[in-house]
Image: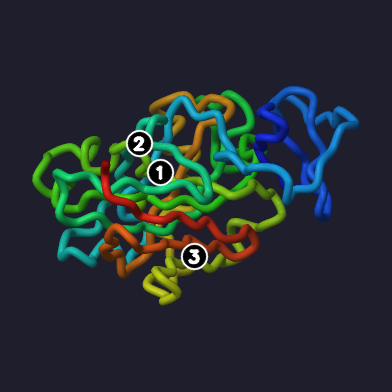
C-alpha cells in the first residue's frame, strides 16, 4: 500500500496511490482506509509532507559508522531528540539556510509515520503501529548543535525536516534497505539499515516506554556515515530504496 497526502483543487486530502492515480480517501488513514470514489492523476496533485505530526522523534547515532564519525563513544542506549513540527516541509520545498549558522549538513534517514496511539508498545507488536515508511532529511546546523548542550536549536530551524514524498508499507524494515544522500547529483552518503544498532521495532519500544506517540507522528531512525555540508544553490536528494526520492533545494534566507 502506498499513501500520499495531497493538495488537489485547493483541498488537502489523503490518497491511496494506485498506478498513476491518487484515489482520495474519506478522512485520514489512521483509523481506517476508505476510498471516497474520487480520484485524480498523481501528476496533477501537489504531494504534501505525508504526516500529521505533533512531534518528530529522532534518533541520534543509530548507525555504528556514524556514531564513531565524530570520535565520540558509541551510546549504550538510543539517543533521542525531538524536531518541532514547524520544521517539517514537503518534497520540493526549499530548506532555508539560517544566517546564524556556518555549517548546515544533510542526514539521510528512513522514517516512519505512526498509525495509532502508541504507549508502552513491545517491539514484537510494533509493526501494527506503523502506517508506512518514508524518506527524511534530518537537516542539522552542525556548528550550533556542537555549541549547545541540547540539540533542539541545531536540529529545529524552520524547514529543517523535509519528509516524503510518499508513505509505503511495502518494505521489510529488516531486509537491509539502502539509504542515500545525493548532493547536486553526487552520492555523498550510501548506508544500509542492516548497520543500525537498534532496529525500527526496538526503537518503537524504547520511545514509547517514555512518551506516547500519536497518530501522524513521525519517527526518524538515524543517519549513516559521511554526513556533510550543503550551501544555498545546492539540491539535496534523500533516496531510500523501495520508497523514492525526496528532493529539496537549499536557499538563502531573505
Ligand atoms: Mg539524524
Question: Label 2, label 3: how many angstroms apart (C-alpha)?
Answer: 20 Å
Q: Residue at x 90, y 31 (%)?
A: 37
Q: Nearer the viewer, residue 213 or 82?
A: 82
Dot 1 or dot 2, earlier in sequence = 2
In the image, the residue with mark 3 has its CB under 8 Å from the nearest atom of ligand 1: no
Q: Secondary structure at mark 2?
A: strand
Are circles 1 and 3 on residues that touch, CB within 8 Å?
A: no
Question: Label 1, label 2: how many angstroms apart (C-alpha)?
Answer: 8 Å
Where does label 2 land, which residue?
A: 83
Coloring scheme used: rainbow
Where does label 3 land, which residue?
A: 179
- Tag of residue 57: none
Give the number of marks.
3
Q: Residue at x 62, y 39 (%)?
A: 130
Q: Residue furthest right?
A: 37
Q: Is residue 7 left or right of residue 227?
A: right
Q: Residue furthest front?
A: 254
Q: Residue at x 31, y 55 (%)?
A: 61
Q: Is residue 120 left or right of residue 73?
A: right
Q: Nearer the viewer, residue 141 or 169?
A: 141
Image x and y of residue 144, in percent: 15, 46
Amino acid at each position: 500500500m502506498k499513501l500520499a497526502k495531497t493538495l488537489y483543487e485547493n483541498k488537502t486530502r489523503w490518497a491511496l496511490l494506485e498506478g498513476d492515480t491518487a484515489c482520495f480517501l474519506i478522512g485520514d488513514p489512521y483509523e481506517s482506509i476508505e476510498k471516497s470514489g474520487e480520484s485524480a492523476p498523481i501528476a496533477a496533485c501537489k504531494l504534501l509532507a505525508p504526516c500529521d505530526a505533533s512531534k518528530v522523534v529522532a534518533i541520534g547515532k543509530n548507525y555504528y559508522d556514524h556514531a564513531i564519525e565524530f570520535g565520540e563513544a558509541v551510546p549504550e542506549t538510543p539517543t533521542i531528540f525531538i524536531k518541532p513540527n514547524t520544521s517539517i516541509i514537503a518534497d520540493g520545498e526549499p530548506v532555508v539556510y539560517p544566517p546564524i549558522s556556518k555549517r548546515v549538513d544533510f542526514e539521510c534517514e528512513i522514517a516512519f509515520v505512526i498509525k495509532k496511539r502508541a504507549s508502552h508498545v513491545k517491539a514484537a507488536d510494533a509493526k501494527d503501529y506503523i502506517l508506512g515508511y518514508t524518506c527524511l532529511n534530518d537537516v542539522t546546523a552542525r556548528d550550533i548543535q556542537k555549541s549547545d548542550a541540547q540539540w533542539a536549536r541545531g536540529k529545529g530551524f524552520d524547514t529543517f525536516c523535509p519528509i516524503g514524498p510518499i508513505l509505503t508499507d511495502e518494505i521489510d524494515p529488516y531486509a537491509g534497505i539502502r539509504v542515500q544522500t545525493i548532493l547536486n547529483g553526487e552520492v555523498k552518503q550510501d548506508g544500509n539499515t542492516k548497520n543500525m544498532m537498534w532496529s525500527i521495532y526496538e526503537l518503537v519500544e524504547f520511545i514509547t516506554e517514555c512518551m506516547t506517540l500519536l497518530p501522524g507522528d513521525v519517527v526518524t531512525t538515524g543517519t549513516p556515515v559521511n554526513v556533510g555540508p550543503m550551501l544555498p544553490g545546492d539540491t539535496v536528494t534523500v533516496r531510500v530504496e523501495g520508497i523514492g526520492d525526496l528532493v529539496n533545494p537549499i536557499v538563502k534566507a531573505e
